[in-house]
Image: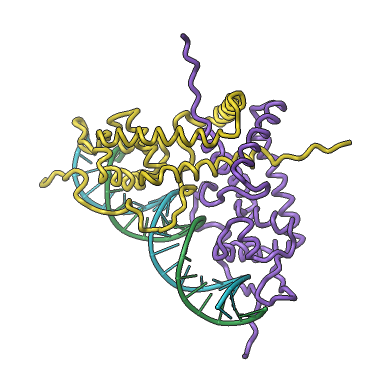
Chain colours: A purple, B yellow, C cyan, D green
Amino acid sequence: MQSRPSRPPIAFLLTQVGSHAAGQFAERLAPLDLSPPHAGILRAIAVNAGMSQQALSGYLHILPSRLVTLVDELQERGLIERRDSPEDRRVYALHLTAKGQSALEAIGRIGREHESAVCAPLDDGEREQLGALLLKIANAEGLMPGVHPGFGRMGPPRNNPGTSELSRGNGKLRRTPRRGK
Amino acid sequence: MQSRPSRPPIAFLLTQVGSHAAGQFAERLAPLDLSPPHAGILRAIAVNAGMSQQALSGYLHILPSRLVTLVDELQERGLIERRDSPEDRRVYALHLTAKGQSALEAIGRIGREHESAVCAPLDDGEREQLGALLLKIANAEGLMPGVHPGFGRMGPPRNNPGTSELSRGNGKLRRTPRRGK
DNA sequence: TATTGTTATACTCTATAACTATA
DNA sequence: TATAGTTATAGAGTATAACAATA
């Protein structure tokens, strides 16, 4: 009886390869000085222009409190705008700027590069197979089509923590609240 | 010309499904009050009994400073021992206890459950295919067979942060250093 | 009273530097 | 001087509570 070479469990391979792919994507995004959550936000706003931060929070499963920071960063860099919603003075309507549009296109190019790199060892038939199998699992688990994975910390190598161009930096963002009673 | 239904990019599916699988595994592990890094450490020590914390750090890509805490937690719960190394008084030789052995067996059972759950929507042939395709990518990326993915924060739902049974708790662990000059 | 965006706070993980004991 | 284990500290993500403005 010849024992077939045992393969690692599929669940383990999925976690390992998925985590690696996520890290690679974050690294490829780093030159744009954007993180995966930033990219996810830009994409969501492009698809659904004018959406509120609450809606975005629910869609991307990012907590509202964290969204404030991420949206601030994108706004400071001129990629998105917070416009006042005409009907409800509590909410912001989020929109891409022209600069945000071209950033999104750059992200698209990086995404295609990334896809090629990840799939490099597979031929066309194998890619077709793998896509179908993964989609089957994703559907069974009830995962949403455009909705990202866990963005939180599986990101890029934080080599110089705190030296990022991102992070804080405050120059009058956000609406001025109504004064007076 | 009929457009085929476009599938999400494979890289994206990998990240999404992999992250979800990792989260599920962490949840299944939670009843044992163990985290994925704990499980990885127990497994590594079982395979390579007597290894040092440095070796473990390199093997699992967990920083030595973080390993101290994780090893402390496993030792407090009687799953592993830090034995003095006879040749070099600086290093600890890490060993599983009997309790650690049975914990590892419980982890194995959970791992098999997890594997079944993840692969539930696939038949035997599809599992074979998927395993082969993932392994091809993992090899191309130079990922090590037993070596974990990014354990860091894609874990279980931290519902009551700080109320975990784990975490701190100090009752004389570790060697007493040589006194006197 | 409920909701949107926001601030404040606590905990965890990551990463680096520095320290102690030993080599 | 170099190394193993440890401690200290800073940064970033997660999560919850609370608050002001508005509904």
* Residue B63 image position (x, y, % from top left): 39, 44
- Is residue B55 visible to the viewer in this orientation of the structure? no
- The single residue placed furthest to the right in the displayed view is B1
* Residue B172 image position (x, y, % from top left): 19, 49
Against A123, residue C18 (above or below) is: below
| Residue B52 position by quadrant | top left
* Residue B135 image position (x, y, % from top left): 56, 27
Residue visible at 27% across and 31% down in the picture: B50
Along the viewing direction, whichever of B26 and A40 lies nearer the viewer: B26
D8 to the left or right of B15: left
Residue visible at 63% across and 75% down in the picture: A172
Q: Quadrant of the C terminus of chain A?
A: bottom right
Along the viewing direction, whichever of B5 and A123 lies nearer the viewer: B5
Residue visible at 23% across and 53% down in the picture: B170
- Is residue B115 visible to the viewer in this orientation of the structure? yes
Against C17, residue B104 (above or below) is: above
Against B139, residue B117 (above or below) is: below
Residue visible at 54% across and 48% down in the picture: A155
- The single residue placed furthest to the top in the displayed view is A1
* Residue A148 image position (x, y, % from top left): 62, 49
